[in-house]
Amino acid sequence: MPGSIIAGVGMYVPENIYTNNDLTKLMDTSDEWIQERTGIKERRFAHRTNETTATMGIEAAKMAIERAGITAQDIDFIIFATLSPDYYFPGCAVLVQRAMKMKEVGALDVRNQCSGFVYALSVGDQFIRSGMYKNILVIGSEKHSFVLDFNTRSRHISVIFGDGAGAVVLQPSKDDGSGMLSTHLHSDGNDAEMLAMYNPGSHANYWHKDLADFDDAELGEMFESHAMIDKYQNLPVMDGQAVFKKAVLKFPEVIMEALNKNGYQPSDLGLLIPHQANIRISRYVQQKLRLRDDQVYNNIQKYGNTTAASIPIALCEAWQDGRIKKGDLVCMAAFGSGFTWASALMKW
Ligand SMILES: CC(C)(COP(=O)(O)OP(=O)(O)OC[C@H]1O[C@@H](n2cnc3c(N)ncnc32)[C@H](O)[C@@H]1OP(=O)(O)O)[C@@H](O)C(=O)NCCC(=O)NCCS
């Protein structure tokens, strides 16, 4: 069965811009350190009460649906990728279904962090290929600002992330050679704790006895406890160097896997859209694959790392800027917490 095409793409980023200098008022950091280590100049943070992960996703979805030339009522399946959902449960996809007054269609949430959008795209593509659905809405959205700790103790994490959303509408290809060629999904759970947020959760230190500084009485109430908050153990953790080392191995590997599978070489790529984790990771991948500047899209300078939203935001901007034309070979690739990594190769 033919793969899916991206019939419409949309994005939404909050109005509030926070520059690196704004962050220096909250923690001990500098514009120079952040730009040199990550490439980030500024990021967007959602309005504290008027914007959520789901509402930003809905704005991006409206744009993607309009550009696909359909209406919300034509959508027959929703996939929502995020690590920062509005509720612990239910997921965000049902909030989109309700807010956009869609039919009682299937609504699925994907929990794959920075690889979430490519995983979601892959799931959607399989449903299109099987003939089960004809208009699938795939959203990646994050409101990181709500869980980031803007204190010097978390500066290596909080300067990296930003808020925003992107969305696409998948439809069956029209047999003109365009559409998804293949998707490739991977994981290595050995490093699950390298980039994670343990709490609130049900783990009670099952996986690692030394995960948190709690006594047995506290562990029993650990899903959400005052002790957890007092000890800052409700915050994300990241071993930045471990993430970096694995990312620079797995990005090129999973991109080459997609190219090899379809008989292409890096030089054939019209555009590579890597997950926007760190400009140094993107540049390393570019160098390793000997890609020209015009073959790689980066916008981390403006938005930071928006996790599941970074690829659809970049895709949307690249398309709007005329960087993707009919017939171009486009590769999307991601790496992140889990660890999970993934790629999707398509003819536009
Ligand atoms: C997070 C990252 C930018 C940190 O860069 P790094 O070169 O590894 O820096 P380190 O963590 O080794 O810290 C180096 C020094 O900078 C300091 N530092 C950390 N964050 C800082 C900040 N925001 N501002 C100023 N100094 C900071 C550290 O305290 C350390 O100081 P020390 O040498 O006095 O101990 C980098 O590891 C990275 O980008 N990793 C990948 C992360 C990622 O992509 N995550 C998302 C995955 S999808």
Image (tube, rainbow, N blue to C red):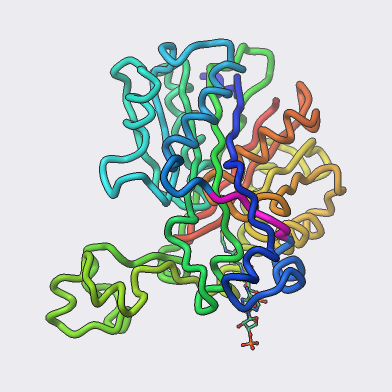
Q: Residue at x 28, y 49 (%)?
A: 88
From the viewer's perspective, tell me whether residue 253 is left or right of residue 106: right
Residue 3 in the image: x percent, y percent? Answer: 55, 23
From the viewer's perspective, tell me whether residue 101 is left or right of residue 60: left
Q: Nearer the viewer, residue 112 or 16?
A: 16
Range of residues picked out in magenta: 40-45
Q: Is residue 64 magenta?
A: no
Q: Is residue 278 above or below residue 332?
A: below
Quarter of image, ligand 1:
bottom right
Residue 347 in the image: x percent, y percent? Answer: 69, 27
Q: Is residue 256 above or below residue 96?
A: below
From the viewer's perspective, tell me whether residue 304 is left or right of residue 185: right
From the viewer's perspective, tell me whether residue 113 is left or right of residue 99: right
Q: Nearer the viewer, residue 34 or 265?
A: 34
Quadrant of the image occupied by residue 174? top right
Q: Residue at x 36, y 38 (%)?
A: 92
Q: Nearer the viewer, residue 191 or 157?
A: 157
Residue 177 in the image: x percent, y percent? Answer: 68, 19
